[in-house]
Structure formats: structure tokens, C-alpha cells
Image (cartoon, rainbow, N blue to C red):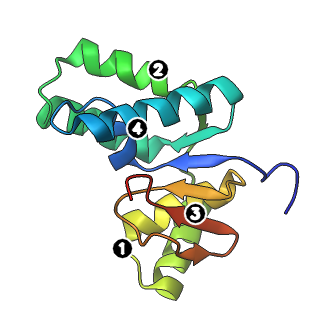
Amino acid sequence: MSAIRKGRVFFDTNVVVYAQDSTEPWKRDKAQKMICDALADGTGVVSGQVLGEMYVTLVKKLRFDNERAADEIRQLAQFKVVEISSALVLRAIQIKSECQLSYWDALIIASAEAASCETVWSEDLNNGQVYGEVTVRNPFL
């Protein structure tokens, strides 16, 4: 494992949304702590996809107004943000085919891989599943 890869963690949309969701306080508290820790030590990574999905969820599901949702996106954008490129889309298509994932889940894995993350924090993917050098972990188990 390279020094660059060590410690980097990718946050899937569901985890960052829980940090703002008061309906499950224990998940909110756990997600907030994880995000704060990753901000403090510089290990947190998200993608443009995650930022977009988070915005839509905050506005539609959690009923945030536009400015409050934008403030939350600005906060999360303090992480390293993986931009979606044609190369990343093609890698996601390859991962989708090889691993039988949805395209969107494959794009999460491709983004984590591109940022040299060792872990993807996600409630949606299979806990403990390894994709290349990226391992999925469910922080709520």
C-alpha cells in the first residue's frame, strides 16, 4: 500500500446526508464525527457526483432551502473533490461490467480509486467488499 493511499477515505452520498438528517440521531452523530475527523486530518474525499446527489437530497428530502443546502455543499467541498471526467466515466463502465454494480455505484468506486482511497464509507454497498485496492465499509454496523 502506498503512502498516498494510506488513510484516505471516500464518503458515499448516504453517509454525508446522514450528517444532516435528524430522523436517525445516532447515524447523524456518527456521520458528523467521521466527517469532522476527516476534515481535521485531511483524509476525506468526495466526488462531484456525491456533491450533486447530496444537494438534491438536502433540498428534496430534508427540505433545506437553496442557500442552506449550498452552505453544506461548500463545507463538504473542503474535502478533496474528484471531478467527473471522460476517463473516470469509462473506468466506471469497466467496473460496472466486471463487478455487476450499478453505473452510479461503479462511479463511486472509480472515484475512490482515482483519489487513491483505501476505504469507501457507504451504507449502500456490501460491507467488506473489496474492489481492487478499495474496501467498502458500512460505518453504521
Which element carries disc 4, helix, strand or loop? helix
Instruction: State how far apart marks 4 and 2 are (Cα).
Output: 17 Å
Mark 4 and mark 2 lie on one chain; the one further toward the N terminus is 4
User: Percent position (x, y) of residue 49?
Assistant: 42, 47
Judged left or right of residue 134, residue 21 is left
For the residues labelled 2 and 1, say whether their Cβ atoms are less than 8 Å apart. no
Question: Who is closer to the viewer here, 34 or 87?
Answer: 34
User: Percent position (x, y) of residue 120?
Assistant: 54, 57
Instruction: State how far apart marks 3 and 1 are (Cα).
Output: 12 Å
Q: Is residue 9 above or below residue 52?
A: below
Which element carries disc 1, helix, strand or loop? loop
- Mark in front: 2 vs 1: 2
How crowded pointer 2 is (Cα within 10 Å; few <14, some 14-19, many 20+) is rated as few
Tell me the kind of residue under disc 1: Ser
Instruction: State how far apart marks 1 and 4 are (Cα).
Output: 27 Å
| Residue drawn 67% across the image and 75% down it | 132
| Residue drawn 33% across the image and 48% down it | 14
Which element carries disc 2, helix, strand or loop? helix
Residue beneath disc 4: 30
Mark 2 and mark 1 lie on one chain; the one further toward the N terminus is 2
Mark 3 and mark 2 lie on one chain; the one further toward the N terminus is 2
* The label number, if any, that marks residue 110 in the structure image: 3
Question: Who is closer to the viewer here, 15 or 50?
Answer: 15
Judged left or right of residue 138, residue 112 is right
For the residues labelled 3 and 2, say whether their Cβ atoms are less than 8 Å apart. no
Mark 3 and mark 4 lie on one chain; the one further toward the N terminus is 4
Residue beneath disc 2: 75
Residue beneath disc 1: 102
For the residues labelled 3 and 1, say whether their Cβ atoms are less than 8 Å apart. no
Tell me the kind of residue under disc 2: Gln
How crowded pointer 1 is (Cα within 10 Å; few <14, some 14-19, many 20+) is rated as few
Instruction: State how far apart marks 3 and 2 are (Cα).
Output: 23 Å
